[in-house]
Amino acid sequence: MSLLDGLINLNLTDTTEKIIAEYIWIDGSGLGLRSKARTLPGPVTDPAKLPKWNYDGSSTDQAPGDDSEVIVYPQAIFKDPFRRGNNILVMCDAYTPAGEPIPTNKRFNAAKIFSHPDVLAEEPWYGIEQEYTLLQKDVKWPIGWPVGGFPGPQGPYYCGVGADKAFGRDIVDAHYKACLYAGINISGINGEVMPGQWEFQVGPVVGISAGDQLWMARYILERITEIAGAVLSFDPKPVQGDWNGAGAHTNYSTKSMRNDGGLDVIKKAIEKLGSRHKEHISAYGKGNERRLTGRHETADINTFSWGVANRGASIRVGRDTEKAGKGYFEDRRPASNMDPYVVTSMIAETTILLKL
């Protein structure tokens, strides 16, 4: 294994200008990530200078077998924490050979919303709190839990310390540092309420980059759990019963909200979000009804509500925002398995472009 590790960690810059680019895209499930690598003649920092590539869409549930070619367009570049050196990870979206976005390409429509002049002028900032659960590989049961059984009730695990409270910290810390290495604006991590469940936060990030960075952070986490022999789950309610679900709370502000008088702008935005509650819920993640029950720090899925410092509301406004009269708010409805391209662009579209 020492020889294998040495080969994996070879520094290519000692012998060649060539680099390895790992092209990454979202598959037909809307949540799964796929990737493959290619050699490039030298370092690249601009995605526009990367070649487009193709893959077999019939094997990812994105194209029929008799016309299976799907084209990936490079959209964002990150440093590769696995191969290191000048090697890169490339976030892509997918198109037909004729240049039309395929149905599962949610980035395309998000980019159109974020390029609208009114949205650009407001400089929307996002901070996404991505919760997830680590599972034992062979039994698909949370790590740290007795097989076929349950740990003690919730209480000591949130931000907990100790071998009987925090399960999987090595994976979590490795992911934290790998994201910082990659250039992702990861702003923190913490243990969550259910044992075996964790959270990382990405942000503040502007516009379409929030989706690019969150997807890449998910990819890096998937790779690390692969190495560690654990299974990564974004199920919004991985264990039924008196256990917290997993969300992707999305913190949001515009330039008008961050300026003096912003609290009034926030209240108007919340009113707009309430008017489209059903549309947002339908786009906020599959299986979210198992999580949004009105219990375990959630609002009921059928009822829109907001409040200051209220984690049982659909929308939470922080005490600091209320005191300052400006700032941001948190949409607590998105599930852990939501598509950040969909959620971030939908929030911008509703709060900035919708006219009541």
Image: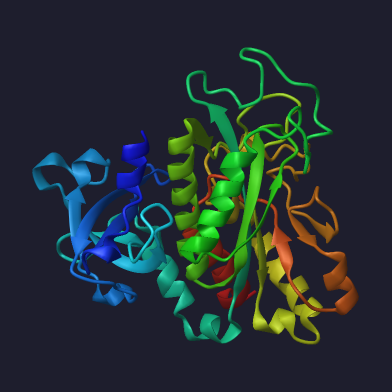
* Between 296 and 19, the one nearer to me in the picture: 19
| Location of residue 128 in the rendering, given as x and y in whole percent from the top left corner | 62, 59
Q: Nearer the viewer, residue 96 or 78?
A: 78
Up-down relation of residue 263 to residue 5 (above or below): below
Q: Is residue 17 left or right of residue 220?
A: left
Identified at 35% across, 68% down, the residue is: 75
In the picture provided, is 349 more to the left or to the right than 78?
A: right
Q: From what the image shows, is residue 2 above or below residue 25?
A: above
Q: Position of residue 291 (x, y in %)?
A: 66, 37
| Total marks placed | 0
The residue under the point 62% across, 33% down is 237
Q: Is the residue 39 above or below the residue 195 in the image?
A: below
Which one is in front, 184 or 128? 184
Q: Is residue 240 above or below residue 186?
A: above
Pick out the residue farthest to the top: 148
Residue extending furthest toward the left: 66
Where the N terminus falls, by quadrant? top left
Question: Do we see residue 101 in this rendering?
Answer: no
Q: Position of residue 121 (x, y in %)?
A: 56, 87
Residue 133, quarter of picture: top right
Using the image as rendered, state which of residue 173 and residue 52 is in the foreground. Answer: 173
For the point 69% across and 40% down, which residue is it? 292
* Position of the C terminus by quadrant: bottom right
Where residue 272 sits, quadrant-wise, is: bottom right
In the displayed structure, does residue 129 sit left or right of residue 284? Answer: right
Horizontally, residue 315 falls left or right of residue 144, namely right
> In the rendering, at what x and y percent does residue 319 appear?
87, 66
Please report the residue visible at 72 percent of the width from the left and 37 percent of the height from the top: 293
Q: Residue furthest right?
A: 323
